[in-house]
Amino acid sequence: MEFQRICLVHYHEIGLKGHNRSSFENRLLKNIRALLEGKPIRDIRRISGRVLILVEQGATWEDACDIEESVLGVPGVARVSCGYACERDLEAIGRAAVAALDDAGDFTTFKVAARRNHTDFPIDSMTLNREVGALLCAAFPDKIVKMKDPDALVHVEVIQGGAYVYARSERGVGGLPVGSSGKVVSMLSSGIDSPVASWRMARRGAIVIGVHFSGRPQTSSTSEFLVDDIAHLLERTGCIARVYMVPFGNYQREIAVSCPPELRIILYRRLMFRVAERIAQREGAKALVSGESLGQVASQTIENILVTNAVVGLPVFRPLIGSDKQEIISDAEQLGTFEISSQDAPDCCTLFMPRNPETHAKPEKVEAAEAGLPIEAWVDEIVEAAEVHDYVCPSYRKRA
Ligand code: ATP
Ligand code: MG
């Protein structure tokens, strides 16, 4: 290819003013750079209002698509356009436009949208549209120029010292760069919901620290492997920094033998929340995240949420609280976690479950049931026994 292949990363600029804007841009640039490590890239840099990726000379079309694919899923990315950089002359721009339109996939109609960022280029945008359009008509004789809603839009941007030409542009996940909204501790099961909840928080700029409660040693560690697979998927877009794997089976057994069966789930959950909060303190995270959706199962009633929240001081975010299962499933499919989450694994959710769980727990009853348990000592023990798995998260800094 005679032209330099490029990917232009666009982000929404709403609300990006002053200092916010440059820290957003720097973070996004840093995240993208780290996630593309090892891919055939010559340079990544900030240009006015966008991030420019220069693909290595000799890289193939597939390489460029792979780079595009990786960047599309990164929080903060609104759009990725792939095309070419060329010299600032009409003939070169025309040839680059032919190459760019070739990359655009199937189309019948097209138009050219030219823009001059520097008026020192002698040809104005209207003339550029016309001239480049004419060259494209000659190169693609069976295609038709259409001004309104064309299948393909060929962008030509003339900048100082060069031009960018692209016709391929895909929508990214949007949101904010991971790391721009602090840290959260997310309760991550191997189920369908909590990976989606974690992902949504990451898309709003939070670094996710997972905590998984496995049924070990009462069950196998299958759920831990599944959670690790899920974390590796989230890792691809820089969303997750670590997961605390917590063997929880023995504590459930203790609760099961000494407390009223209908309160078991609530007692498990109160213990989980306390452990998650302790981990949050250790990590400097300022909120907890859970994948509950109102009324989905017995433990997800307003009353039960109230008695579970009562044991922690940090805010608990539930990004799925108003979502239907179908919406959550379609997000999980898009994220790629659905298949992993559909595998059966015994975890603490399947262990020592009561037949008729309480749906409207009374705080006094729950507190009375807990009174005889060494809760504080358990929390210390559990956090101590947790196994920490680390993932690549460019924004995360380990605390001493
Ligand atoms: P999920 O699909 O996320 O497992 P669920 O529909 O199975 O959710 P519950 O079992 O009631 O619902 O769990 C509600 C939330 O509690 C989960 O979304 C998750 O945030 C947390 N949670 C449940 N089990 C575990 C676990 N074993 N480890 C960590 N968090 C858990
Ligand atoms: Mg579950």
Image: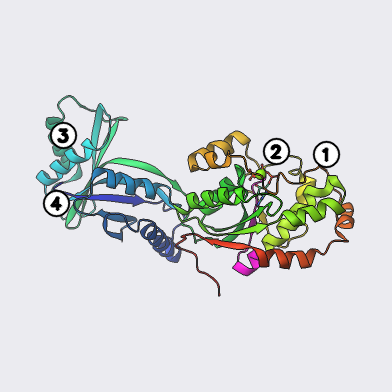
Query: Are the residues at dot 4 and dot 1 in contact (C-beta closer than 8 Å)?
Result: no
Please state which amino acid type lies under the numbered disc 2.
Gln
Q: Position of residue 383 (x, y in %)?
A: 67, 65
Circle 1 residue: 356
Q: CA distance from mark 4 to mark 2?
A: 59 Å
The C terminus lies in quadrant: bottom right
Question: Mark 4 vs mark 2: which is more N-terminal?
Answer: 4
Please state which amino acid type lies under the numbered disc 1.
Asn
Circle 4 residue: 88
Tell us which disc is closer to us: 4 or 2.
2
Question: Mark 2 vs mark 3: which is more N-terminal?
Answer: 3
Q: Residue at x 69, y 54 (%)?
A: 217
Query: Are the residues at dot 4 and dot 2 in contact (C-beta closer than 8 Å)?
Result: no
Query: Are the residues at dot 1 and dot 3 in contact (C-beta closer than 8 Å)?
Result: no
Tell us which disc is closer to us: 1 or 2.
1
Q: Position of residue 43 (x, y in %)?
A: 27, 60
Going by the picture, which residue comes out furthest to the top? Answer: 142
Q: Residue at x 49, y 61 (%)?
A: 179
Tell us which disc is closer to us: 4 or 1.
1
Magenta-colored span: 279-292
Label placed on residue 296: 2
Label placed on residue 136: 3
Q: Is residue 226 left or right of residue 254?
A: left
Question: Mark 4 vs mark 3: which is more N-terminal?
Answer: 4
Helix, strand or loop for disc 2:
loop
